[in-house]
Amino acid sequence: MVTERGFGLGLRNAVAEFLLLLLLLEQIFLASIVTAGNFTLLRRVLKESSLLDLGRLLLDRIKMGSKSKVKADSPREMRRKVAAHLDHMETLLTQDFLFGDAPNAGDFSAYHSLWFRRDLAGRNIAGSHPKVDAWMNRMQAFGQGTRKDISADDALEIARQAAPRDLPAQVEQEPLLGQPVRVAPSDYGREPVFGELCYCDASTLVVRRDDPVVGQIQVHFPRDGFVFSKAD
């Protein structure tokens, strides 16, 4: 029998573990991508794009990194972090998914960087981390739903014909509401978006802007990881 007090402690521990995992994922993403690089990855990338496209991508990443506030670790430290992350996940996987019988945001957040490492770069983890490997197979089995390819012009036309959805009632007091603002990531890729702050709460910012191609749009940002200020 589990008492209410015991259940509460278990729930708090689960929430703490979940939040810790999300924090670790912020720190592990770059390390997982960088240390995944090998000839298998290069061959697969070149099958889908040209050397010119690859060069453009690298230049874009260098430009993005030059504005980063995140200090990059050494390759050795990155490899250590990835190994420790895999070890940690292996201990968490006592059930089908990280926090129970069904996946949640933690599972989907953890999956993508490891997909890059295992499935795109072809790095085998089944021998060293069999539970993580089996978990990735379960995540992969979800598929991508029903999809239909459309052209870029068709996608823009759909956006042009659509109207922004209604926003919740504004509760939080924010002096910049209705004012032109600048919103940008706080870590890397710090390219700003400009527009009118039309909604905010404890977790979300919404900026309304007029796009020359599709008209009026509302861009939603999480508050965590982004900064906003009055536009100059």
Image: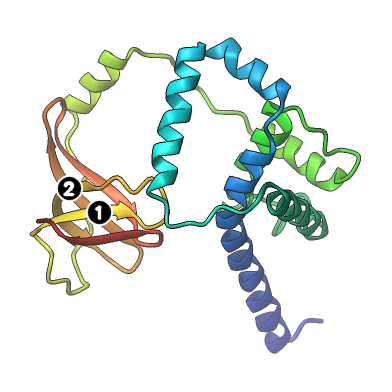
Which of 105/40 is in front?
Answer: 40
Drawn side of residue 193 relative to residue 24, left or right: left
Task: From the top left corner, tell me how far across and down residue 125 is, in percent.
Answer: 83, 39
Q: Amino acid at mark 1?
A: Val
Which of 24/178 is in front?
Answer: 24
Disc 2 and disc 1: Cα gap in Å? 6 Å
Question: Does the residue at mark 2 contact the one at mark 1 (Cβ under 8 Å)?
Answer: yes
Where, by quadrant of the figure, is residue 113 drawn?
top right
Label 2 residue SS: strand
Question: Residue lying furthest right in this view?
Answer: 127
Give above or below for 197 relative to 121: below
Give above or below for 172 relative to 200: below
Give the residue at x 24% y 21%.
Answer: 156
Which of 104/180 is in front?
Answer: 180
Give the residue at x 24% y 63%.
Answer: 200
Task: From the top left corner, tell me how far across and down residue 11 is, in percent.
Answer: 65, 75
Label 1 residue SS: strand
Task: From the top left corner, tell me how far across and down residue 4 is, in percent.
Answer: 68, 86
Q: What kind of colouring is applied to the model shown?
A: rainbow
Give the residue at x 58% y 60%.
Answer: 22
Neighbours of disc 1 within 10 Å: few (<14), some (14-19), many (20+): many
Which of 178/157 is in front?
Answer: 178
Q: Which mark is residue 183?
A: 1
Q: Earlier in the sequence, mark 2 or mark 1?
A: 1
> Pointer 2: what residue?
194
Drawn side of residue 143 relative to residue 163, left or right: right
Q: Amino acid at mark 2?
A: Phe
Task: From the top left corner, tell me how far across and down residue 219 is, in percent.
Answer: 25, 45
Give the residue at x 27% y 58%.
Answer: 205
Q: Which mark is residue 102?
A: none
Q: Quadrant of the C terminus?
A: bottom left
